[in-house]
Structures are given as C-alpha cells and as structure tokens.
Amino acid sequence: MSTNTHGANNPSNGNGPNSNANDEPLFSLRTALLLLAAIVIGSVIGLLTYAASQNVPTAVIAGIGVAGATLYGGHSLLGHG
C-alpha cells in the first residue's frame, strides 16, 4: 500500500468513516430518552387503540398524538438540559 503524504488513507488520523471530528454524540442523552419514551408510549397506545377498535387510521392518529404529547410533556418536565 502506498503512503499518501496528506494522510487520506491513514485510518489513525481521524478522517476515516468511523471517526467523529468533535467527538460529540448526534443526540444528547436527554433527547435520546425523550425520543425513546415517545416511541414506546406512542406504540403502546396505538396498539391498544387498534386492539379496541380494529381501525388502523384511528390507531395511527392516537399513537402519533400520544407520542407528540409525550415529547412535549417530557420536554416540560425534564427542563432544557
């Protein structure tokens, strides 16, 4: 393998596909927890709504609504970081 003086093929220089130049995560822990809670709670409510009504559009709307309410409520309860 030839050596490139600019380090383009050097995996130890931090420019590879698996490196993050500033070492910051994409989401903060708070954001990840809020999104996870919204997805889980929205899915549970959507499934329960479908089980009760056998109506897919109603279940989807209920799940999305509850997921949004969970994000809003969680944002209010947990503060701004």
Image (spheres, rainbow, N blue to C red):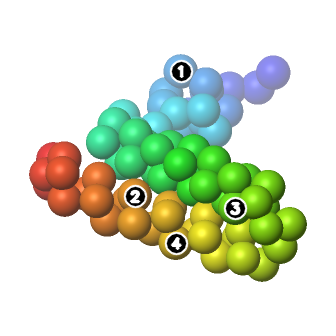
The residue located at (52%, 33%) in the rendering is: 19
The amino acid type of the residue labelled 2 equals Thr
Q: Which residue is mark 1?
A: 12
Q: Determine whether 77 is above or below 15 in the image.
A: below
Camera-nearest label, 2 or 1: 2
Report, in whole angstroms, how far the alpha carbon at label 3 lies from the one at label 1. Answer: 52 Å
CB atoms of marks 2 and 1 within 8 Å: no
Q: Nearer the viewer, residue 7 or 33?
A: 33
Question: Could you say which quadrant of the image residue 10 lies in?
Answer: top right
Report, in whole angstroms, how far the alpha carbon at label 3 lies from the one at label 2. Answer: 17 Å
Disc on the earlier residue, 4 or 1: 1
Camera-nearest label, 3 or 1: 3
The amino acid type of the residue labelled 3 equals Thr
Tell me, for residue 65, which label it has, or none: 4
Q: Nearer the viewer, residue 23 or 10?
A: 23
Tell me, for residue 70, which label it has, or none: 2
Camera-nearest label, 4 or 1: 4
Report, in whole angstroms, how far the alpha carbon at label 4 lies from the one at label 1. Answer: 46 Å
Disc on the earlier residue, 3 or 1: 1
Question: Please, what secondary structure does the residue beneath circle 2 have?
Answer: helix
Q: Which residue is mark 3?
A: 49
The amino acid type of the residue labelled 4 equals Gly
Q: Determine whether 27 is above or below 14 in the image.
A: below
Disc on the earlier residue, 2 or 1: 1
Disc on the earlier residue, 3 or 2: 3
The residue located at (28%, 59%) in the rendering is: 73
